[in-house]
Image (tube, rainbow, N blue to C red):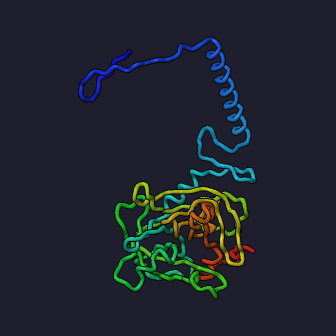
Amino acid sequence: MSEVTTESGDVAEISQRRRPPSGLAIAGFVVALLALLVAALTALASLGSSGGVDLAGGSTAQQESGTNVDVAAVVALADAAVVTVYCGNSSGSGWGIDLADDESSTDDDAYPYEIVTNWHVIEECVNTDVPITIQTLEGATEADAFLFDFDASYYDETSEVWADLALLMTAEPVATLQPATEAPVVGDWVMAAGSPYSQFFDAILPGTYTFGNVSNFFPDISIIVTDAAINQGNSGGPLLNSRGEVIGTNTWGDDTSVSENNGYAIGIPTLCLKFISCDASSNWEWK
């Protein structure tokens, strides 16, 4: 019998009845332990030789092609360039883009930074007194943002190329991401960045990343399908490839009652077609 003191200060006795181990039981335990140890060492050796896990740094992943991805480097790029976009009581995400040399960019020097997001993230604030604001990952306060251009043809069934995109401008310094000039390939590693809403914390989680692969790509309508989770609040954030380039803008995910593994992003060619002048020599059309 052993004694413990309860929160009230009383002493209670706990009965400890254990069957004494037999020699056979001990031998069996030792054999099982050795088997587990051998299996663990074999698994680690296999991972180390495949190059899929960096046991020292823990920051690399492996594409199906066998090349390593510096996950930490891609995350660092996103940390600096992804913002949370607020519209009234709702929120989404956005990413900085450099339009300084583009004829379609704003000439208003007071708001020199441009942000890509989804139209549905900010549409409730358009033509109202409700402000659009953005916040960087390290920003202490929200900064004003203004609608520069938008395309809502996603809601038009007659449109040949769907878009649910908007361009914002702001005075808040925002780092930029480089749009990809090559089309995604099924199996490519991808990272979805943004500020999803968490039911568990009942809060927005800026700087949250999910990882996966390109599941499908429809070049005619420039829609990328991915198994990287795209949750509520990820809308407008970037979908990045292994080089840290943006291949698309996260837009929606399937209802979990239908499918839990399909997320969708609007490809860079749509951004070029709708908003900005892209250099055809850079293969912007992804042909």
> Can you see residue 167?
yes
Q: Position of residue 70 (x, y in %)?
A: 62, 51
Number of marks in the rendered image: 0
Q: Quadrant of the C terminus?
A: bottom right
Q: Residue at x 52, y 63 (%)?
A: 231
**Residue projecting furthest to the top:** 23
Quadrant of residue 247 within the rendered picture? bottom right
Q: Residue at x 62, y 63 (%)?
A: 259
Q: Is residue 15 left or right of residue 69?
A: left
Q: Position of residue 269 (x, y in %)?
A: 65, 76
> Can you see residue 242?
no
Q: Position of residue 125 (x, y in %)?
A: 40, 80
Q: Position of residue 58 (x, y in %)?
A: 59, 42
Q: Is residue 243 left or right of residue 8?
A: right
Depth check, front residue: 68 or 15: 15
Q: Is residue 43 above or below residue 166?
A: above
Q: Quadrant of the N terminus?
A: top left
Q: Residue at x 56, y 63 (%)?
A: 230
Depth check, front residue: 250 or 146: 250
Q: Residue at x 40, y 19 (%)?
A: 15
Depth check, front residue: 30 or 268: 30
Q: Is residue 29 left or right of residue 105?
A: right
Quadrant of residue 142 within the rendered picture? bottom left
Depth check, front residue: 40 or 13: 13
**Residue projecting furthest to the bottom:** 158
Q: Is residue 240 above or below residue 101?
A: above
